[in-house]
Image: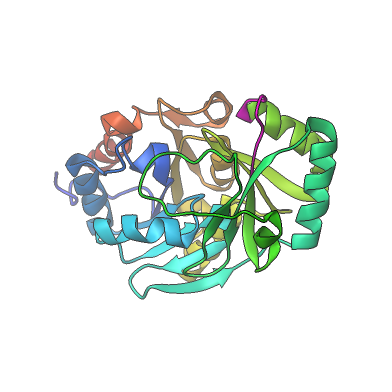
Amino acid sequence: MDPAAAPFPYKLVATDLDGTLLRDDGTVSGRTREALAATTAAGAAHIIVTGRSVPWTRHVLDDLGYEGLAVCGQGAQVYHAGEHRLLTSLTLDRQLAGLALAKIESETGPLALAVSRDGLDGEVLVTSGYRLQEGPLRSTLVEDPAELWAAPLNKVYVQHPELDDDALAQVARATVGSLVDVVMAGEGIVEILPLGLSKATGLSLAARRLGLKAADTIAFGDMPNDIPMFGWARHGVAMANAHAELKAVADEITDSNADDGIAVVLEKLLLG
C-alpha cells in the first residue's frame, strides 16, 4: 500500500474500540494495524474513542504501541497514551446520579449496579447481581452498595433482571433524560452519564488539541453511543455488526470488526 498514491481525504480517523477496532477476541488484526499505520504515514491522526474508562483501556493501547490521544469513558476522559497522563476528566454528580437511579427504579424495580471511579487507576465496583462480561477487565465486588458512592465517579452502569438493554435504556431515558444522559454502549452495558456528555464532547476536545475539526474527521463505530460522534464527524462509518440505530444514521456501512471493516475503508481511501 503506497500512502503517496493519493492525498488522504481526512486529517483525523476516530475509531471506537469494542466491536469496531477490536475483533471479538480483543485483538487488532495485522491488516487493520497496517492500514492505520499507512493512514498516519499519509498525514492523518488516529484517535481511539471508547466507552471504557482509562484503566480498562490502557492495556489495549500499550499492546498497540499507541502513543496518541485517546478519548475514554464515553467522552469524560482525554488521555495521552504516550505520556500515560490524564489530560481532562469530567465526573458525574453523585447526588444527581442517586436521584436518577431512584426515579428509574420507581419505574422498573430494583437494578443491579456498577460504577467507574474517576482517575488513572479508578476501580470499577460492582454489586451482587451485576453481570460482567468474561475477560481480563478488572472489577471489585462490593457488599455494601454505599461503597459505590464513596469517591468521584465517571459513570454508573445499570442492568435489569428482565428488561433487555434497549428497553432499559428507553425507560431510563424517558424517566431521567432531563437530569442525566443514558446510553447503550454494548451488550449488557447501559450507562448513566453527566448530562450533555458524549463521545462527540471528548472527541472535539481531543481534536482541538491537535488543531483539527469535525470537517477533518472520519469516524468508525458500532453502537448507539457512537451516534453523537457520527453527528459531529464529517463522515460516519458503521460496522456490519453495528446496532440498527447507528446504521440508520451512518453515511456508510463497512464489513464487520471480524472482517477488517476499518481496513477495508482506509485502504480504499489511501488508493484515492
Q: Residue at x 33, y 42 (%)?
A: 22
Q: Residue at x 66, y 65 (%)?
A: 91
Q: Residue furthest left?
A: 1
Looking at this view, is 178 or 122 the one in front? 122
Residue 254 image position (x, y, % from top left): 37, 28
Query: Can you say whether 81 is above or below 198 in the image?
Result: below
Asked if residue 44 shows in the view, the reply is: no
Q: Main secondary structure of the magenta part?
A: loop
Q: Residue furthest front?
A: 143
Does 164 appear in magenta? yes
Residue 29 image position (x, y, % from top left): 22, 41
Q: Which residues are magenta?
A: 158-165
Q: Tell whether 123 sits left or right of 195.
A: left
Q: Quadrant of the C terminus?
A: top left
Q: Residue at x 66, y 54 (%)?
A: 197
Looking at this view, is 112 or 184 the one in front? 112
Quarter of the figure with residue 112: top right
Q: Residue at x 67, y 25 (%)?
A: 163
Does 80 appear in magenta? no
Q: Quadrant of the N terminus?
A: top left
Q: Tell whether 61 sits left or right of 212.
A: left
Residue 79 image position (x, y, % from top left): 45, 67
Looking at this view, is 4 or 146 the one in front? 146
Residue 176 image position (x, y, % from top left): 81, 43
Looking at this view, is 261 or 101 the one in front? 101
Asked if residue 121 shows in the view, the reply is: yes
Query: Can you say whether 144 is above or below 81 in the image?
Result: above
